[in-house]
Amino acid sequence: MKVFMTGATGFVGSRVLPRLLQAGHEVIALVRNEKAAAQLKVKGAEPVLGDLESLDTIAQAARQADAVVHLAFIHDFNNFEASCAVDIRVMDTILGSLAGTGKPFVVTSASSVIGDTGDALAPETAPDAGRNPRQSEAGVIKVRQIKINRGREIS
């Protein structure tokens, strides 16, 4: 399976990438610079230069893939709303590219979206109430709106 991946050099992505490759998948990975591209080539992935603002590049790579794994996020917590806005645009772009195809789309998030559940495990149906309810609620509402607009389930 050909998988398009964002965040392949990040904390989560650097652990997911080798597993995808070991499972025999072909991975196309969005990278911001030539150094990261060279590192991913050595590992066996096909780099595509761009960043989370490169929506045309993201759309094209998503269309060419059999599945998309979106792991990237701009971790600028001084400008959290802007970072979330970029993430929303990326997800909307990917969903637009996958519309009507039935191709899988996997997205990571953070536990802060659900909030503190104590010792209990939180299922995907758990209410969303992060540490900052306004930020969490705003982001969750936007993602839900994208899902409604695009008619897709997001895993």
Image: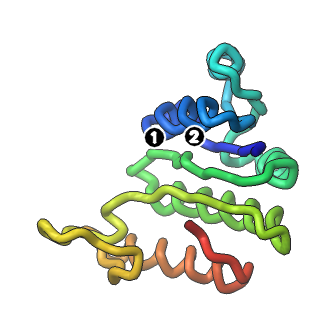
Residue 105 drawn above or below residue 26: below
Residue 76 drawn above or below residue 29: below
Numbered circle sitting on residue 12: 1
Q: Which amino acid does label 1 sit on?
A: Val
The residue lying toward the viewer, choosing from 34 and 26, is 26
Looking at the rendered structure, the secondary structure element under dot 1 is loop
Can you say which quadrant of the picture contains the C terminus? bottom right
Query: Around disc 2, counting alpha carbons within 10 Å, would you say few (fewer than 14), some (14 to 19), or many (20 or more)?
Result: many
Among numbered discs 1 and 2, the one appearing first in the sequence:
2
Which residue is at the far left?
A: 119
Q: Is residue 118 left or right of residue 55?
A: left
The residue lying toward the viewer, choosing from 7 and 55, is 7
Looking at the rendered structure, the secondary structure element under dot 2 is loop
Can you give x and y, in whole percent of width and height, for residue 136 in the image?
38, 72
Residue 40, by quadrant, is: top right
Q: Which residue lies at the image location 69% right of the left edge and 77% below the top edge? A: 152
Q: Circle 2 is placed at which residue position?
A: 7
- From mark 1 to mark 2, how far is it between C-alphas? 8 Å
Q: In this view, does 62 lie to the left or right of 20?
A: right
Q: In this view, does 93 lie to the left or right of 9?
A: right
Q: Which residue lies at the image location 49% right of the left edge and 35% below the top edge? A: 10
Q: Which residue lies at the image location 66% right of the left edge and 46% below the top edge? A: 52
Q: Which residue lies at the image location 74% right of the left edge and 67% below the top edge? A: 95
Q: Is residue 24 left or right of residue 56?
A: left
Query: Around disc 1, counting alpha carbons within 10 Å, would you say few (fewer than 14), some (14 to 19), or many (20 or more)?
Result: few
Residue 30 can be seen in this image: no
Can you give x and y, in whole percent of width and height, for residue 15 in the image?
47, 34
Whether label 1 touches label 2, CB < 8 Å: yes
Residue 91 drawn above or below residue 152: above
